[in-house]
Structure formats: structure tokens, C-alpha cells
Image (cartoon, grey):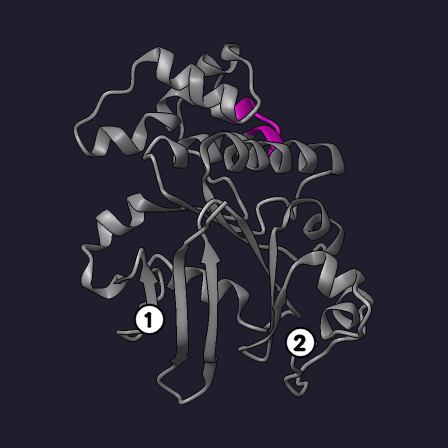
Amino acid sequence: MTTFTKIAVKDLTLALGNNSTLLHNASFNVPAGEIVTLIGPSGSGKSTLLRCLNRLWEPPPGSVFLDGEDIVSLDVLVLRRRVGMVFQSAALFSGNVSDNIAYGPRLHGRVLAEKEIIRLLEIVGLDRAYAHKAASELSGGEGQRVALARTLANEPEVLLLDEPTSALDPAATRHVEEAVLRLRDRLGLTVVWVSHAVEQVRRVADQVVLLVAGQVAETGTPQHLLDGDHHHLTEDFAAGKLGLPVQKEKTS
């Protein structure tokens, strides 16, 4: 099966006004229909890089491409419909679950039929009865899955996840993971997922990108970087031995 690059990051460097560099020459590809996880120590630039992919942080021209097109040349609202994002906290609006899911399409003049809302709930593993449940009554895991359905209502091509399970218990975490895996398997959705949990990476990732001090230190499959024949920095990260700063090391 032939895959193509959905998102390409090329020599992405991002600095603040005080000249501190958040990202330095970061480069990697996100294959279409795969889950790519961004991992690394705290402060390594994972969330910053993720936000560059839909211009919540503005990347320099010529550094981030969607289907071969520089994202800074795209209308930002169109880009954010194509590249949707789910944050660490669900941040649901007041009202019921249906109100939340229908919010994005309504902004663009599209009314979601109840059957579409139910279909989105089923995709994220929630029963149709949730459609009329108040958002304030949801558990953390249920809220994250509704936030995921709300993002999917905009029919994105790419899903960005910024540690969406970090505040959830193990059962709720698995529900979210299973929902995202279904999206990849059933809809061919491309996912970029920031995670700090190595076991989660083993369960969900097709590819791993290790960031250290704003640089891409290693890329590869979880099997290669975590369980391969050669030592990798990713193993040090998994063992809690990887701090900042560290020298970039080539993947064997």
C-alpha cells in the first residue's frame, strides 16, 4: 500500500522576541492515515510544534506544508477546519452535547441533522442517549470524547491532539485511545498526538518523533525506537533518564 505525506515539517525554527529559540530546524513527515506521536521531556517544544501545524503559533513561510502547500498561504479558518485540534482540557460550552457537536458547522452556516450527531457520537464510542445530556454532567473521559466529536463535525483531514488523556483515569484514557484508533482505521484520518506516556505511544503510534531542546532528535516506529536492537535516546526518555539539554543523536 502506497502512502503519501500529509504534513511535511521542513527546518522549522521558531524564536520569541527575546531571541529564545523554541524550535530549531525541526524536520519530519506525517504520512497520510497514520498516527504520529510527539514525545520528549517537558519544555522540549512538543505543544509549540503541534500548534504550528494549524497556525495557533505562526510558523515561518516554507516550513510547514499540508498536501504540499505552504500552510501560511492558506486562509487560517479554512486551515483550522482541515487541521482540527483537541486540547488537554475538553473546555465544552454550556448546553447539551448536541449543541457542542453542532457548534463548528453552525458557524459556517451548516446545520447538523440529529442522525449526523448520533453518527459522530458512535464514532467516538458514546451512545446516542448522550446527544441530549448536559455538558456539565459529563465525566472527564466523556467530555474529551465529546470534544473529539465536536472537532470531527468540521470534517478535518488531520487531527491534532495535545495530551488529551493526561488528566484522565486509565479506563477513560483507553476509551479515548480506542476512539482515535477507530478514526484512523475506519476513516483514514491522519493524527499528530502529543503524549508523555510511553505505554500509550506503544499502543497507538505508527511513528514516533522525539523532541529534545526544540530539535527533532529521533524518528521511527515505536518498535524500532523502544524495542530495537540498538540503543536510542527514546529508550532513555522511556526510562526517565532523558533531561535537557542533550546532544542530538542519529537513529541507527
Circle 2 packing at 10 Å, graded few (<14), some (14-19), many (20+), is some
Instruction: Report the Cα–Cα distance between label 1 and label 2.
Output: 26 Å
Residue 9 image position (x, y, % from top left): 41, 68
Q: Residue at x 40, y 89 (%)?
A: 19
**For the residue marked with disc 1, what is the amino acid?**
Pro
Can residue 151 be seen in this snapshot?
yes
Q: Secondary structure at mark 2?
A: loop
Residue 139 in the magenta stretch? The answer is: yes
Tag 2 residue: 251
Residue 213 in the magenta stretch? The answer is: no
Mark nearer the N terminus (1 vs 2): 1
Tag 1 residue: 59
Q: Give the number of marks.
A: 2
Q: Residue at x 36, y 66 (%)?
A: 57
| Mark in the foreground, 1 or 2 | 2
Q: Residue at x 40, y 80 (%)?
A: 13
From what the image shows, is residue 87 above or below residue 114?
below
Q: Which residues are magenta?
A: 136-142
* Left or right: 138 in relation to 63: right
From what the image shows, is residue 9 above or below residue 166?
below
Dominant secondary structure, magenta: helix
* Left or right: 237 in relation to 146: right
The image quadrant of residue 156 is top left
Can residue 96 be seen in this snapshot?
no
The image quadrant of residue 157 is top left
Judge by depth and name the residue closer to the eye, 186 or 172.
186
Judge by depth and name the residue closer to the eye, 2 or 239.
2
Residue 166 image position (x, y, % from top left): 65, 48
Residue 209 image position (x, y, % from top left): 59, 65
Judge by depth and name the residue closer to the eye, 67 or 108.
67
